[in-house]
């Protein structure tokens, strides 16, 4: 008999929140202010989900001091206004409320933890989660695997059963970060990931309302 999942980790950007407008606008503003070229809109969307420093390297070709300058300006602008230029995906609140009836919920996001908390409080989602784990403000913890390490540690402190966790996220970073811990992933098909990023996941939900049934099905082999 399939054993149910005991805790559910959930990504933020592209899974709970459609946060692309604030992220892409703020990033473009930061690059312009610093006299750096702005990638086209389609490429700016690649920044939604992964750590910002990864996007600056892979999309904008910026590393070292240049990347740190952009990151610092981006963070300042984003905390001021960009963080709230977002909308919860239709149906995600109801899905999360149903999921919370199955197992405890935790946020695991590459967004700075303090910013993630502000966003979730602003939109009235914070109380749905047992813990909210994210990147550190200095980006020393930003890889999804490291964020999941923190989420699991916080959950352990609260006595949550970690025997069978599952991750819900929209990008390959979620799948790979969870896999580093032996955790399966259900992909949020409404997010920003390309179809091929679901490789290795145990399922794909086309809409939030499909999540509870996939979670209740329990651990199955990857697709």
Image (cartoon, rainbow, N blue to C red):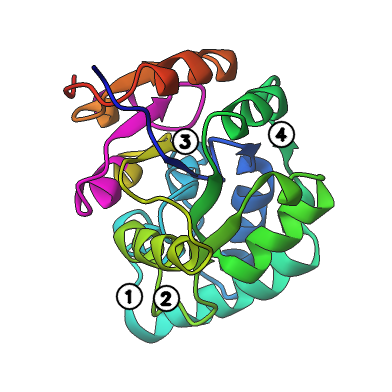
57 over 97 or under it: above or below: below
How far is mark 4 from mark 3, CA to CA? 21 Å
> If you read the primary sequence from the N terminus, does the residue marked by circle 3 or circle 1 appear first?
3
Q: At 57% across and 79% down in the image, what residue appears?
A: 72
> Residue 70 at x, y = what percent?
52, 74
How far is mark 4 from mark 1, CA to CA? 32 Å
> If you read the primary sequence from the N terminus, does the residue marked by circle 4 or circle 3 appear first?
3
Q: Mark 4 = which residue?
A: 88
Q: Mark 2 = which residue?
A: 67
Query: In the shown orientation, is residue 65 left or right of residue 103?
Result: left
> Residue 51 at x, y = what percent?
42, 60
> If you read the primary sequence from the N terminus, does the residue marked by circle 4 or circle 1 appear first?
1
> If you read the primary sequence from the N terminus, does the residue marked by circle 2 or circle 4 appear first?
2
Residue 144: in magenta span = no
Q: Residues within 10 Å of mark 3 (few under 14, many from 20)?
A: few
Q: Are marks 4 and 1 in contact (CB under 8 Å)?
A: no
Magenta stretch: give its range.
Answer: 175-196
Query: In the shown orientation, is residue 108 left or right of residue 148?
Result: right
**Residue 42 numbered tag:** 3
Q: Nearer the viewer, residue 60 or 186?
A: 186
């Amino acid at each position: 008999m399939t054993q149910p999942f005991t805790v559910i980790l959930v990504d933020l950007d592209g899974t709970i929140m459609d946060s692309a407008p604030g992220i892409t606008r703020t990033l473009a503003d930061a690059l312009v202010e610093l006299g750096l070229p702005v990638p086209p809109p389609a490429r700016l969307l690649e920044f939604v989900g992964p750590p910002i420093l990864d996007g600056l390297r892979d999309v904008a070709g910026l590393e070292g001091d240049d990347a740190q300058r952009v990151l610092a300006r981006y963070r300042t602008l984003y905390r001021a206004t960009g963080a709230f230029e977002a909308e919860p995906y239709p149906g995600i609140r109801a899905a999360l409320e149903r999921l919370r009836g199955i197992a405890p919920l935790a946020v695991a996001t590459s967004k700075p933890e303090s910013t993630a908390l502000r966003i979730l409080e602003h939109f009235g989602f914070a109380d749905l989660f047992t813990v909210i784990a994210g990147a550190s403000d200095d980006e020393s913890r930003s890889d999804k695997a490291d964020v999941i390490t923190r989420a699991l540690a916080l959950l352990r402190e609260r006595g949550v059963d970690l025997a069978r966790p599952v991750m819900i996220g929209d990008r390959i970073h979620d799948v790979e970060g969870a896999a580093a811990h032996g955790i399966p992933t259900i992909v949020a098909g409404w997010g920003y990931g390309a179809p091929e990023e679901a490789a290795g996941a145990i399922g794909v939900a086309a809409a939030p309302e499909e999540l509870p049934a996939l979670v209740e099905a329990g651990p199955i082999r990857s697709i």
